[in-house]
Image (spheres, rainbow, N blue to C red):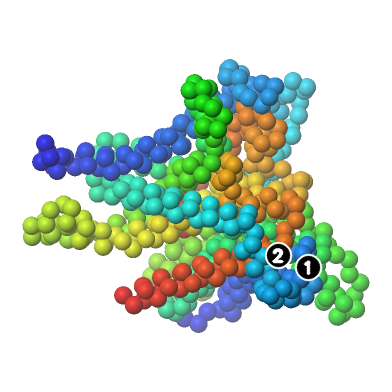
Amino acid sequence: MFQRFRENRGLQGFLLILPTLIVMIALLVIPLIMTVITSFGQRNADGGVIYTFTLENYWRLAGFTPEGWDDLYLRILLRSLWLALQTTIIVILMAFPLAYFIARAPERRRNFYLFLVLIPLWTNFVIRIYAWVMILRGQGVLNSTLGMFAGMLNLPFQPFDFYPSQGAVLIGMVYEFLPFMILPIYTSLEKIEPNLYEAAADLYANPVRTFFRVTVPLSMPGVVAGTILTFVPVIGTFVVSDILGGRQVILVGNLVQNQFLSARNPPFGSAASIILLLFTLALTLYYTRRFGLGEEIAAG
Amino acid sequence: MSARRQSPWVVLSAILVYIFLYAPIVVLIVFSFNSSRTNVVFEGVVNQGPCGPFFWYCELFKNDDVMDATRNTLTIALTSTFFSTIIGTMAALALQRYNFRGRNASETMLYFPIVTPEIVMGIGILVLFSASFGWINSLLALAPDRRLTMGMGTVIVSHIAFSIPFVTLVVRARLHGFDNRLEEAAMDLGANELTTFRKVTLPLIAPGVLAGAMLAFTLSLDDFIITFFTTGPGATTLPIYVYGLLRRIVTPEVNALSTIWILVVLIVVGISQWFQNRE
């Protein structure tokens, strides 16, 4: 019998993947099914769930409330998508030059430069946002620095209201996810053969043309991977908006968190969460079909 | 890519991005020496008690809440890294080297957590645990002090779940260039499967496994959202603790804590780099 097991590669492979399957089914598939079931339910008076089948929660999200038309939730969804889009574009624009710089640096220095990108990640996610509060608030570091410069130039100075605001949330999001764009773009750029640049130069392409015809197309796998690693967390997070946006910036993540912890309406929160998941999956699926699969996710 | 002279514009924008990345870190560290308790404006270097400028660092070690949160965070990170590394490496071996029924489905399921917003996974697990704990508790009519509740156990299990896909990805990348003939050679020379695995396979994939474990550890230390939804009494982690403080007042102790944190990470990474360079 042991001999048969030794020869049965199929069984061996299955046994190796079995623990993963058990964990994924127990903590991903079943929870998602339960979320879907809950989203069709109703809340009871003390925040529990009555399991029925009603589409009421989804209608409410779409704007059809018992009290009439209300596009509050549609606006929250659009705001989240718009913020995720803005963040992703800014992050790509900031990550590209740095990744390019590291990829073209002398080989023995590259690891050090990459290491510099990673160090900020090893402080804590929440603490990093708190650091931005210290910088952006009324009497914070940025306003004092600006005030000092204004004082030196004898200019009148009024502290800016950087925090809390939608702009502060955007800065926080960009800061949190920038490294996850730099790493995959670097990995793509680093793979480009130097011969290609020489060939482009030999064929009389100027540096700008070389950049757009050689560098950019070949960096696309990294950009795709980085976009997924940025867009997905941004659209689902509630911490950055909670801390840097005060109570002004409500995103889908805040809505879901709020329904579960303050409003005590798990069915409505579940429906919002399912809609969030469907949007994210549809967008990533479309994006990876359009631009190829992000092989470089592993690098990030 | 060849090392050529870089355009000054590239260098300048790289420097600006580095400044953006480091400004908050510098502010965090500077304010850990602040003499103001409210920590809004820097009012000069603290010089109080036997610790002098390191006053907040000493306060930190006297603060039981912070110490408990640190202990919980490390316990969760170490335990979940241990299990997710083993399970994730097994999955990587299975997917890369074996053919079995359900291989494609398993692969899809493994990538799914990466494109699922964390909050969706977090509330899913919350819904599952709160419903099933409720049923079990009422079914077995457990006494109040023996009821199943959210806590360290639920957080650890959830961290294992979200780390596995990342470990698998990293280990698979390492297995990609693996030369199967090395194992065949070992078997031809009379080694059995176990010896071959221990003496040939494991040493070759060890760097990948180590990289996967480090990634899992980092993800666990840093996680806020999933922990937020799966935690319970007695399982406060550092991110949860700091988040709670942000709604009231943050003293420079938090800055001292993050400064120590950065130093510890730098030392650990420095040592591991040194070992790698020696090899």
Check disc 1: other Cα within 10 Å, few if <14, some if 14-19, many if 20+: some
Disc 2 secondary structure class: loop
Do the residues bearing badges 1 and 2 touch, measured as CB atoms within 8 Å? Answer: yes
| Image side of residue A59 versus residue A107, left or right | right
Residue sitting at x 75%, y 52%:
B248
**Residue B194 on image: x %, y %:** 18, 53
Tell me, yes or no, if residue A35 can be seen here.
Answer: no
**Residue A15 on image: x %, y %:** 26, 40
Q: Do labels 1 and 2 share a chain?
A: yes
Disc 1 secondary structure class: loop
Q: Looking at the rendering, in which quadrant would you find the C terminus of chain B?
A: bottom left
**Residue A274 on image: x %, y %:** 57, 33
Quote the CA–CA distance across marks 1 and 2: 8 Å
B161 w.r.t. A133: above or below:
above
The numbered disc on residue B36 is 1
Chain designation of label 1:
B
Give the residue type that dot 2 points to.
Answer: Pro
Q: Nearer the viewer, residue A228 or B129?
A: B129
Q: Which residue position holds label 2?
A: B252
Q: Looking at the rendering, in which quadrant would you find the N terminus of chain B?
A: bottom left
B21 w.r.t. A264: above or below:
below
**Residue B124 on image: x %, y %:** 53, 35
Residue sitting at x 46%, y 31%:
A30
